[in-house]
Amino acid sequence: MQIFFHPNSRRVDKFLKLSDTIGLSAFTLIGIKVADSMGTNVPVALLLGVITIIVGGIIRDMICNEIPLVLQQEIYITAALTGGILYFALKNLGVTDWVADISAMSTIFTLRMLAIRYDWQFPTLEWKY
């Protein structure tokens, strides 16, 4: 896609990151809600929500011939887990489903966009031989 928009590559990159973040928040919640509807407990539902985004992200990055974001320093899974935990906390407090859904997705979206904007990354381990 960037080949066609080379002069506007910064704009396209921002659009792709925005689209990825929307997908991250949506598919995390889809994975969590499907697992929850099957009667799994909270940790398993969170794990399945994270697996959903990991596998989807790896497939996306393999198609684009890039290193998967999951294997980089990006704040990706942490944002998804935070939103998932918020979803279950709100659900246990008796909040309606749509409010819990929007709150969880907004949290994931906001954390990921802040991480992109301010270049938040996890530290790397350096191996010394």
Image: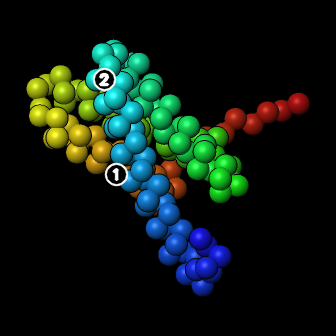
Q: Position of residue 60 (x, y in %)?
A: 58, 50
Dot label at residue 102: none
| Nearer the camera: disc 1 or disc 2 | 2
Please indicate whether residue 112 sits to the left or right of residue 94 in the image.
Answer: right
Dot label at residue 110: 1
The outermost residue toward the right is 129
Q: Residue at x 50, y 44 (%)?
A: 75
Judge whether residue 118 can be spotted in this image. Answer: no
Please indicate whether residue 70 sits to the left or right of residue 17 in the image.
Answer: right
Q: Residue at x 48, y 39 (%)?
A: 53
Pointer 2 local density, CA inside 10 Å: few below 14, some 14–19, many at least 20: some
Dot label at residue 36: 2
Quadrant in which the N terminus appears: bottom right
Local SS, label 1: helix
Q: Position of residue 78 (x, y in %)?
A: 45, 37
Q: Position of residue 103 (x, y in %)?
A: 23, 43
Of callouts 1 and 2, the N-terminal one: 2
Please indicate whether residue 127 sits to the left or right of residue 122 in the image.
Answer: right
Q: Quadrant of residue 92?
A: top left
Local SS, label 2: helix
